[in-house]
Structures are given as C-alpha cells and as structure tokens.
Image (cartoon, rainbow, N blue to C red):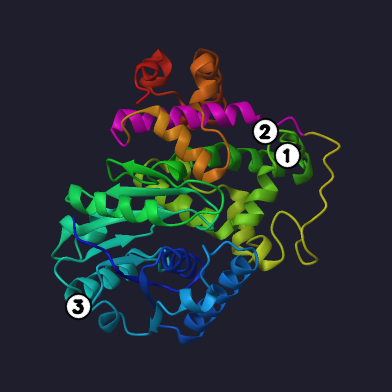
C-alpha cells in the first residue's frame, strides 16, 4: 500500500471544499481545483471560516487555522494540480461526460501510482474508469453531506478496481475527522446504481410520486401529506423534497429509470414543479413557499395517503435486492450505513420481525399503484435474508 501524503480534490463546490477541509484536518497536503476561479475562492473562504469556527471551540487538536491552511494550495488547472498527487478525489457535477473528462486528464498527468476516486452518488465507477488506462486504480469514494458531520463514506469497487486501491481509500477515510463520532466506512462490493444508502431509499420515491399525483387529483393539500408523517419523520416528505431539491430528485429518478426500472420516472407533480422553476428551498418555491425562510406547516389534519411503515417495507425490499446482487456481504452493513449516512435506522432491525406483514403490504401496493418494482423480491418474501447478517 502506497503512502498517501498529497491529495488533489477536483471541484471546490459544496462537497469538494468540505472534503478538502477534513483532509487538511487529517494532515494531508491538499490542492483544491476548480475551473471557475470564483467558486474556488469561495471554497477556500468557506474552509477558512469552518476551521476558525472549530478553532474557537478547541476542535482542531491544538492546531491553529493558519497551520491547517498552510497545507492547502489551489489551482484552476487540473493537469498541473495532479502532477504530484498520491490520491485524487473528484467532486464535480453529476454529469458522466464531465467526470470522464476529469478522469482522463488526471490519468494522463498524475503519477502512475496515483489512485483516482469519484465522489459520485449514483454513477457507474466502471464506466468512469473507461476514460483511463488505470481502471485498477479507479474507485468510488462517496461522502455524505456535510462530510464533517456525516459519518458514512461508501468505498465502491468498479469491475476492475484492485483490493489495494480500495484498502488505501478505506485507510484515508478512517483518518478523516468527523464531529459526530467515529467514521463508518462501508465497502460496496459491486458497482450497482445508488450503491447502498441512496439505493435503499430511492424506491420510496416511486411510492411518494404516486402519492403526490393522487393528492393533486383529489385536491389534497401538501400539508396533509406531511401530517401523515408527523411524529415519525423530522420533516414530512414534501418539505424534505423541497429541502433537498426537486431538480436533484428528477435527475436521480431519470438515472434509476434507465438503470433499474421505468417505475422510477418522476410523476406529474414533480415534473410540473421543476418545469416551472419551482425546485424547492433554493428557488424559494416548491411544494411550499420558502421565500421567507422555512415554511410553517399546518399538520393538524392528515391525508391518510402516506404510511411511513410502507416506506420502511420498501427499504427492506431494496436492501434484500442488494443482498441478492452481492453489493454487500450482509444486512448489518446496510443498517449501519443508513444510520451513519442518514441519521435514521436501516430497515432490517424492524424488518426481521415484520417481513411477512410487509410482504403483504407491498403486494397490495404494487397491485394498487401498478408499480411492479415495489413488489417484494424472493429474498424478502421467503425471509432468506435472516441468514445473511454479516
């Protein structure tokens, strides 16, 4: 295993500058790269702000902000920036062609021993690796937002990724600080859409899109759907969708529709809102009006459409699919990854006792919605997953 001293972080946006900050805190030398100098400068400014805040709380292990920042350099030229890199983390936008171009440039200009990692949340590591002549050294390293608070890092094998590259990434991941406790590194054994955490949560969106469209047809206010989740979820599904971005939801749904099932296609309501520019919190309008801050949602009346238990059943079914596909070695990893990445328990704890009941619920849901992807897979239906804990 090569010694890692110099990291190159490609992309200085939301995820990139956060990854750079925790890498600096772990005493790596970091070059932060972005083709947009304004975004690069903003990223550096946010890193400095973040470090000063931590220093004021004595959370920099006795180091000063200046000492930590002394390990940071910046560049707008990827080819030059990776010349001495031991390890590259790509954190550019979720566009496969752009990512492949970044990897091609990194491959052509970095040392032969350099490992190239993508922070993609959904895209195929195997496909990205095709842009290089070192597919054995191309891996996925998926952080959760914000990396300094969220404990999970998914380390993903492409079809040709070497064990050495994966083990090196795991070692780096374990070194990166997290304010909410010990890092949880989840090894993803197969390059499948959504990896672990995003994958098990993705098909809940099939159910929600059906609910949104039902509510629109029946004239049911969005507040009543969120009221259905009151006491179970910190944010109801409509508020949460607004908060994370309806446009991002559509992009993810399109990807899963191509790679997993057409049932993932966005519904009429979400599509209409995004086409109107109503993407949620960041645009000031989505399901709710965010122009004056977080909306006050009246949850006094329920719609009776959204059942959180069905959402858990869907997650259990998808977790069983991951086990069938060999993405992870056991369901304990799925539950622990979901807790570390989403701050909510995974589905198997409750699913062990309820899988028979949930199987019936999902059969009924598939019949009612016409979404066959929601129908239970064989491993869930039989309870075969119970023997696959580790």
Q: Is residue 242 above or below residue 379?
A: below
- Stretch in magenta: 303-327
Please tell me whether the stretch drawn in magenta is mainly helix, strand or loop: helix
The single residue placed furthest to the front in the displayed view is 62
Q: Is residue 52 left or right of residue 15?
A: right
Assess whether mark 2 and mark 1 are in contact (beta carbons under 8 angstroms): yes
Q: Secondary structure at mark 3?
A: helix
Q: Upstream in the sequence, badge 2 or badge 3?
A: 3
Picture quarter with the C terminus: top left
Q: Is residue 209 above or below residue 272?
A: above
User: What distance separates the C-alpha of mark 1 from that of mark 3?
Assistant: 52 Å
Label placed on residue 225:
1
Decide: few, some or many residues near mark 1? Use Cα within 10 Å; few <14, some 14-19, many ≥20. many
Whether residue 123 appears in this view of the structure is: no
Name the foreground residue: 83 vs 231: 83
Q: Is residue 174 above or below residue 205?
A: below
Image coordinates of residue 120 in percent, x first then y, are: 38, 58
Q: Upstream in the sequence, badge 1 or badge 2?
A: 1
> In percent of the image, x 14 and y 69: which residue is there?
112
Whether residue 328 appears in this view of the structure is: yes
Decide: few, some or many residues near mark 3? Use Cα within 10 Å; few <14, some 14-19, many ≥20. some
Q: Is residue 358 above or below residue 326?
A: above
Assess whether mark 3 and mark 1 are in contact (beta carbons under 8 angstroms): no
Image coordinates of residue 284 in percent, x first then y, are: 71, 66
Label placed on residue 109:
3
Q: Nearer the viewer, mark 2 or mark 3?
A: 3
User: Is 12 contained in the magenta span?
Assistant: no
Name the foreground residue: 329 vs 297: 329
Q: Is residue 135 left or right of residue 95?
A: left
> In percent of the image, x 79 and y 56: which residue is there?
295
Mark 2 lies on residue: 306
């Amino acid at each position: 295993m090569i010694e890692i001293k110099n990291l190159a972080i490609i992309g200085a946006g939301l995820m990139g500058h956060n990854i750079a900050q925790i890498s600096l805190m772990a005493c790596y030398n970091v070059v932060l790269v972005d083709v947009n100098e304004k975004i690069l400068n903003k990223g550096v400014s946010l890193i400095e702000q973040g470090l000063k805040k931590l220093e004021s709380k004595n959370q920099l292990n006795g180091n000063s902000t200046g000492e930590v920042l002394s390990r940071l350099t910046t560049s707008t030229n990827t080819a030059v920036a990776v010349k001495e890199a031991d390890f590259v983390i790509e954190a550019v936008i979720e566009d496969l062609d752009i990512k492949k171009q970044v990897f091609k440039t990194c491959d052509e200009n970095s040392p032969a021993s350099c490992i190239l990692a993508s922070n993609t949340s959904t895209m195929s590591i195997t496909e990205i690796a095709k842009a290089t002549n070192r597919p054995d050294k191309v891996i996925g390293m998926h952080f959760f937002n914000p990396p300094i608070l969220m404990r999970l890092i998914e380390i993903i094998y492409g079809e040709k990724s070497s064990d050495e590259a994966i083990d090196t990434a795991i070692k780096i991941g374990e070194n990166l600080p997290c304010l909410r406790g010990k890092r949880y590194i989840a090894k993803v054994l197969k390059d499948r859409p959504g990896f672990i955490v995003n994958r098990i949560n993705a098909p809940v969106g099939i159910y929600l899109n059906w609910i949104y469209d039902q509510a629109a047809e029946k004239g049911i206010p969005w507040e009543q759907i969120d009221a259905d989740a009151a006491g179970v979820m910190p944010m109801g599904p409509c508020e949460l969708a607004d908060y994370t971005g309806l446009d991002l939801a559509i992009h993810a749904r399109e990807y899963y529709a191509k790679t997993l099932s057409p049932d993932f296609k966005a519904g009429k309501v979400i599509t209409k809102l995004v086409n109107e520019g109503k993407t949620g919190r960041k645009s000031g309008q989505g399901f709710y009006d965010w122009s004056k801050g977080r909306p006050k949602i009246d949850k006094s009346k329920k719609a009776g459409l959204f059942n959180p238990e069905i959402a858990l059943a869907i997650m259990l079914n998808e977790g069983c699919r991951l086990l069938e596909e060999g993405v992870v070695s056991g369901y304990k990893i799925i539950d622990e990854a979901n807790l570390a990445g989403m701050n909510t328990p995974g589905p198997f704890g409750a699913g062990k006792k309820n899988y028979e009941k949930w199987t019936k619920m999902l059969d009924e849901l598939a019949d009612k919605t016409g979404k066959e992807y929601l129908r239970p897979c064989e491993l869930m239906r039989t309870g075969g997953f119970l023997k696959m804990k580790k």
